[in-house]
């Protein structure tokens, strides 16, 4: 029986590459992955793209880089005001002069924490509807909504990834120990997990928030210590199944250590459910942060937060831009992550044909 060249080549491709190839064939998951990856990478350039500080200023024959410095006094550029220089006003001044002074501003010259109450183009009390100056309008404190959404996106995704990584590391180590050693280690370990799972998450956060001022790092630790239980259950089951197979017995007969058997042999064969559930764990972490921000126990103001913007939309329900844009950004982000999760789960499915085509 003759086989085609393509079929012969596929036999020598690793399982990981086959799964990656299958993931790329599920278009909505693949395109969502590319879009989310591009947006997340671009969000690290927010200080250079969305900021009220100039990128470069040439004044008096010298070059200044305000975006890389803490601040420059207004008197450094001949402005008659106290405090930091107003670079948007400086740009207008330089454009009206016939000299060698010039300034390069970011493409979107507004900062997420900047109050725009003194801007002449904003008439009336905040919030203001979208305009040419402010693409998504301003919030009830006259801060730019687009800038706050852009910075909040980076915070939300970074927070979710850190929580997933922290909870996965703890859950995988403990679940691996429970499943591999079994016996009393598993019995006592499961009782401790059940006790820890019975602790009320929200009340714990409220108590901690009343004692210390929570920041992103604190919230990552709090959510991480509450999210590892489910991962430990999956890992425990996988280790129970894999340690009964022949390759584990062969490793034991060769005298390998428990750590080597657990993490060199069993762990690589136990990652399928962990990787499949990772995108959905990311969704849960982002939603948790938004919920905590909405309730006032999350990231402290004036840090840009999606939950805080959602709360503003509820308080100003007649201001359509405060309702539509924050909820739309949250919906689009979570939808892309769910599409990625579905594609990953399908790529790890041993079936030949995909349900998501």
Image: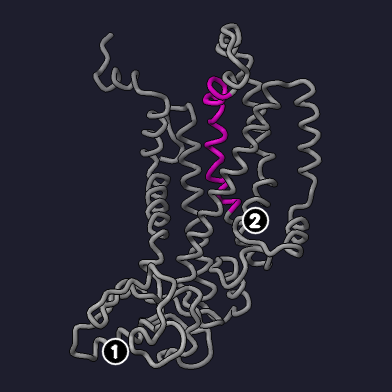
Tag 1's secondary structure? Answer: helix
Element under label 2? helix
Magenta stretch: helix, strand or loop mostly: helix
Q: Residue 259: which quarter of the image?
A: top right
240 displayed left or right of 124: right
Tag 2 residue? 218
Q: Position of residue 320 (x, y in %)?
A: 52, 78
User: Nearest the camera: 74 or 18?
Assistant: 74
Looking at the rendering, the stretch of residues picked out in magenta corresponds to 263-285
Q: Is residue 18 left or right of residue 265?
A: left
Residue 292 visible: no
Residue 269 forms part of the magenta stretch? yes
Figure quadrant of the N terminus: top left
The residue under the point 49% across, 61% down is 153
- Residue 93 got which mark? 1
* Residue 300 as seen in the image, left or right of residue 202: left
Q: Residue at x 80, y 29 (%)?
A: 188
> Of callouts 1 and 2, which one flags the residue occurring earlier in the amino acid sequence?
1
Q: Nearer the viewer, residue 238 or 9?
A: 238
Answer above or below: position of 54 versus 330.
Answer: below
Q: Position of residue 271 (x, y in %)?
A: 54, 30
**Residue under the point 48% across and 57% down:** 333
Say if mark 1 contacts mark 2, CB within 8 Å.
no
Residue 39: horizontal and vertical position, in percent? Answer: 40, 57
Task: Say which of 5 and 312 sits in front.
Answer: 312
Q: Is residue 164 visible?
A: yes
Spatial separation of the CA atoms under disc 1 and disc 2: 44 Å
Query: Residue 119 colored magenta?
Result: no
10 Å crowding of disc 1: few (<14), some (14-19), many (20+): some
């Amino acid at each position: 029986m003759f086989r085609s060249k393509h079929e012969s080549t596929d036999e020598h491709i690793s399982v990981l590459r086959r799964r990656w190839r299958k993931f790329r064939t599920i278009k909505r998951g693949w395109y969502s992955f590319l879009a989310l990856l591009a947006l997340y990478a671009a969000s690290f350039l927010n200080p250079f793209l969305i900021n009220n500080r100039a990128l470069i200023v040439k004044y008096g024959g010298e070059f200044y880089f305000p975006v890389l410095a803490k601040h420059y006094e207004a008197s450094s550029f001949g402005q008659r005001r106290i405090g930091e220089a107003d670079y948007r006003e400086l740009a207008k001044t330089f454009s009206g002069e016939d000299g060698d002074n010039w300034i390069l501003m970011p493409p979107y010259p507004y900062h997420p924490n900047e109050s725009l109450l003194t801007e002449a183009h904003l008439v009336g009390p905040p919030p203001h509807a979208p305009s040419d100056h402010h693409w998504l309008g301003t919030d009830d404190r006259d801060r730019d909504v687009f800038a706050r959404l852009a910075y909040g996106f980076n915070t939300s995704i970074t927070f979710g990834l850190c929580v997933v990584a922290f909870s996965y590391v703890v859950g995988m180590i403990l679940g691996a120990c429970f499943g591999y050693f079994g016996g009393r280690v598993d019995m006592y370990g499961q009782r401790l997990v059940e006790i820890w799972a019975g602790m009320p998450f929200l009340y714990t956060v409220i108590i901690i928030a009343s004692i210390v001022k929570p920041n992103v790092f604190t919230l990552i630790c709090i959510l991480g210590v509450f999210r590892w239980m489910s991962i430990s259950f999956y890992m425990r089951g996988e280790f129970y199944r894999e340690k009964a197979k022949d390759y584990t017995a062969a490793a034991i007969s060769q005298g390998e250590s428990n750590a080597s058997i657990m993490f060199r042999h069993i762990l690589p064969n136990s990652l399928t459910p962990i990787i499949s559930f990772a995108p959905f764990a990311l969704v849960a972490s982002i939603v948790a942060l938004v919920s905590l921000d909405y309730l006032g126990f999350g990231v402290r103001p004036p840090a840009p937060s999606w939950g805080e913007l959602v709360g503003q939309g509820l308080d100003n329900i007649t201001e359509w831009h405060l309702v539509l844009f924050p909820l739309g950004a949250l919906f689009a982000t979570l939808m892309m992550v769910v599409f990625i999760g579905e594609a990953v789960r399908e790529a790890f499915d041993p079936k030949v044909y995909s349900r998501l085509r």
